Image (cartoon, rainbow, N blue to C red):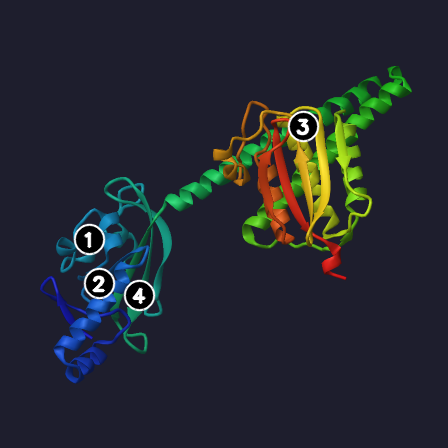
Amino acid sequence: MTAHFAGSTTRLPGVAPAQVATDAQNEPEDVLAHMVLDARAAVDALPDGVVIADEDGIVRLVNDRAVSLLGTTRTAAEGRPLAEVVTVTDQDGASWVGCTQPYDGLVTRTGVPEQSWITRSGEEVLVTARIHRAPGHGPVTDVAVSLRSGRARARLDRDRSDLVATVAHELRSPLTGVKGFVQALLNRWDRLNDEQKKLMLTTVHADSDRLSRLITELLDVARLDTGRLSTHPRPCEVRLLAHRVIDSVRAGAPHRIDFRAPADLPDIWADPDKFTQVLTNLLENAIRHGSDPVTVTASLDGDHVVLQVDDSGDGIPPEIRQRAFTKFWTTGQRGGSGLGLYLVNGLVRAHGGTVAIDESPQGGARIVTTWPAQSDRS
């Protein structure tokens, strides 16, 4: 199909010239013009930039996004050589067309892989191309170039850097404790009494548990991000699991943690390891950013068991509560990995539950999670 733009003939990529000629003979000119205008509107609606050049390397179509990314105009771009329109360069100043030479190479060549390039304004763009050929590995008939902003990849790179920094920081503290106590035991074994040895080994054991839990959390974060988190739900007794978590948290640092639940509270349908992970994160978050006492309350609400954790700290202002569930979000001066509530949110929702932040009666934060009750699964 053909139409005239900027004084030249435009056809859609992948349509052979012979087919275009046949279509032009069989279709009225106004119908063809409307079809091409519709095609242009569709290309303009794409989120990525598109530049289409013909077999002679002359640009026949540029969409709005490409015009914006390349810093040109449609009138100036269409009808000019591809090398003069796609002016992105690499770090050494070499042009995209000069480096990739889309019209050369083997007759089996059908594309140019995506790579990072720099526009004249200094913005990073990711550029790829599809090479269309005549049937039977014939000559190039069209080159369709796609451009998209590199900002998303830059954000991903920053997230990866933040993750590396977080992992390094969070691993350093328990590893330092383990190394220090093991070194002391090796150097002073004969001079330490049994009580001192037991204290050191208990601390090493607690730090090892912390390391193991952190590694598990990092793996779960990666699985959440890729949609590959697996759970193994079964009937779980909330009271039993909650008391185990509370005892474990108290062993690491003595704090006043109260637990309240009715005697007839039904079991929940959940993965016990993930439930333990969620409650451990909530309690450690409450202790780190709040103050004693911390209260854990479980109750039945319809077909869900509601588990809420209240602390006595400063709370989380309403305007930033949704941000608390984002990755690497932290507040205050007490640090943390910034992954705790992100992981809590992902794990609870993977079970079909919900997570919300409210204000506790003491003025601190209240984190409310819901879990499906076992009565639904019986």
Query: Is the Cβ of the residue at disc 2 closer than 8 Å to that at disc 3?
Result: no
Residue that carries the numbered disc 3 in the rendered image: 287
Q: Nearer the N terminus, badge 2 or badge 1? A: 2
Query: Is the Cβ of the residue at disc 2 closer than 8 Å to that at disc 1?
Result: yes
Residue that carries the numbered disc 4 in the rendered image: 131
Q: Disc 2 vs disc 3: which is toward the camera?
A: 3
Q: Nearer the N terminus, badge 3 or badge 4? A: 4
Measure the C-alpha gap from mark 4 to mark 1: 17 Å
Judging depth in this view, the residue of 23 and 281 nearest the camera is 281
Q: Secondary structure at mark 2?
A: strand
Q: Nearer the N terminus, badge 3 or badge 1? A: 1
Q: Residues within 10 Å of mark 2 (few under 14, many from 20)?
A: many
Query: Is the Cβ of the residue at disc 3 closer than 8 Å to that at disc 4?
Result: no
Image quarter of residue 180: top right
Q: Which mark is residue 53?
A: 2
Residue that appears at 26% across and 69% down = 13
Q: Nearer the N terminus, badge 2 or badge 3? A: 2
| Residue sticking out furthest to the left | 7
